[in-house]
Image (cartoon, rainbow, N blue to C red):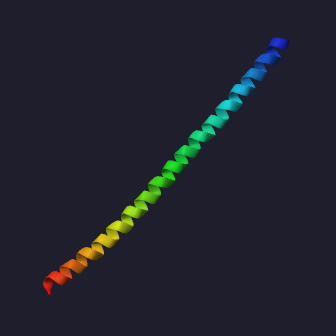
Amino acid sequence: MEFAIFGLLLVGIILLILSFRKNRENSVETQLENFTIQLMKEIYQIKKKLKVLEDEMMINDKN
Protein backbone atom coordinates (compact mmCIF):
# COMPACT_ATOMS: atom_id res chain seq x y z
CA MET A 1 0.00 0.00 0.00
CA GLU A 2 2.82 2.37 0.86
CA PHE A 3 4.44 1.64 -2.48
CA ALA A 4 1.26 2.63 -4.37
CA ILE A 5 0.93 5.91 -2.45
CA PHE A 6 4.61 6.73 -3.02
CA GLY A 7 4.25 5.87 -6.73
CA LEU A 8 1.20 8.09 -7.16
CA LEU A 9 2.93 10.94 -5.34
CA LEU A 10 5.96 10.59 -7.60
CA VAL A 11 3.80 10.56 -10.74
CA GLY A 12 1.96 13.66 -9.50
CA ILE A 13 5.22 15.55 -8.91
CA ILE A 14 6.54 14.60 -12.36
CA LEU A 15 3.31 15.76 -14.03
CA LEU A 16 3.43 19.03 -12.09
CA ILE A 17 7.00 19.69 -13.25
CA LEU A 18 6.09 18.88 -16.86
CA SER A 19 3.12 21.25 -16.77
CA PHE A 20 5.36 24.17 -15.72
CA ARG A 21 7.84 23.29 -18.43
CA LYS A 22 5.10 23.30 -21.08
CA ASN A 23 3.88 26.73 -19.91
CA ARG A 24 7.39 28.09 -20.30
CA GLU A 25 7.60 26.74 -23.86
CA ASN A 26 4.27 28.37 -24.71
CA SER A 27 5.53 31.63 -23.27
CA VAL A 28 8.63 31.56 -25.46
CA GLU A 29 6.51 30.70 -28.49
CA THR A 30 4.16 33.61 -27.77
CA GLN A 31 7.08 36.01 -27.31
CA LEU A 32 8.61 34.90 -30.61
CA GLU A 33 5.27 35.34 -32.38
CA ASN A 34 4.83 38.84 -30.95
CA PHE A 35 8.40 39.75 -31.95
CA THR A 36 7.79 38.52 -35.49
CA ILE A 37 4.58 40.54 -35.80
CA GLN A 38 6.32 43.67 -34.50
CA LEU A 39 9.19 43.15 -36.94
CA MET A 40 6.76 42.77 -39.86
CA LYS A 41 5.00 46.01 -38.86
CA GLU A 42 8.31 47.89 -38.74
CA ILE A 43 9.36 46.54 -42.14
CA TYR A 44 6.00 47.62 -43.58
CA GLN A 45 6.45 51.15 -42.19
CA ILE A 46 9.97 51.36 -43.62
CA LYS A 47 8.75 50.23 -47.03
CA LYS A 48 6.00 52.86 -46.99
CA LYS A 49 8.51 55.60 -46.13
CA LEU A 50 10.91 54.38 -48.80
CA LYS A 51 8.12 54.45 -51.39
CA VAL A 52 7.32 58.08 -50.47
CA LEU A 53 11.00 59.02 -50.75
CA GLU A 54 11.32 57.31 -54.12
CA ASP A 55 8.26 59.17 -55.38
CA GLU A 56 9.72 62.49 -54.21
CA MET A 57 13.00 61.68 -55.93
CA MET A 58 11.17 60.93 -59.18
CA ILE A 59 9.30 64.25 -58.96
CA ASN A 60 12.53 66.15 -58.30
CA ASP A 61 14.33 64.43 -61.18
CA LYS A 62 11.62 65.46 -63.66
CA ASN A 63 11.95 69.13 -62.72
Residue 14 sits in quarter: top right
Residue 38: % across, % down = 46, 59
Residue 26: % across, % down = 57, 43
| Front-most of residues 11 and 54 | 54
**Total residue callouts:** 0
In the image, taking residue 58 as reference, residue 38 lies left or right, namely: right
| Front-most of residues 19 and 31 | 31
State the residue at coordinates (20%, 83%): 59
User: Hey, which residue is sitting farthest right in the picture?
Assistant: 1
State the residue at coordinates (34%, 71%): 48
Residue 6: % across, % down = 80, 17
State the residue at coordinates (72%, 23%): 11
Residue 50: % across, % down = 29, 70
State the residue at coordinates (45%, 53%): 36
Where is 14 relative to 55, above or below?
above
User: Hey, which residue is sitting farthest bottom in the picture?
Assistant: 63
Where is 28 relative to 38, above or below?
above
Report the quarter where the N terminus lies: top right
In the image, taking residue 22 as reference, residue 57 lies left or right, namely: left
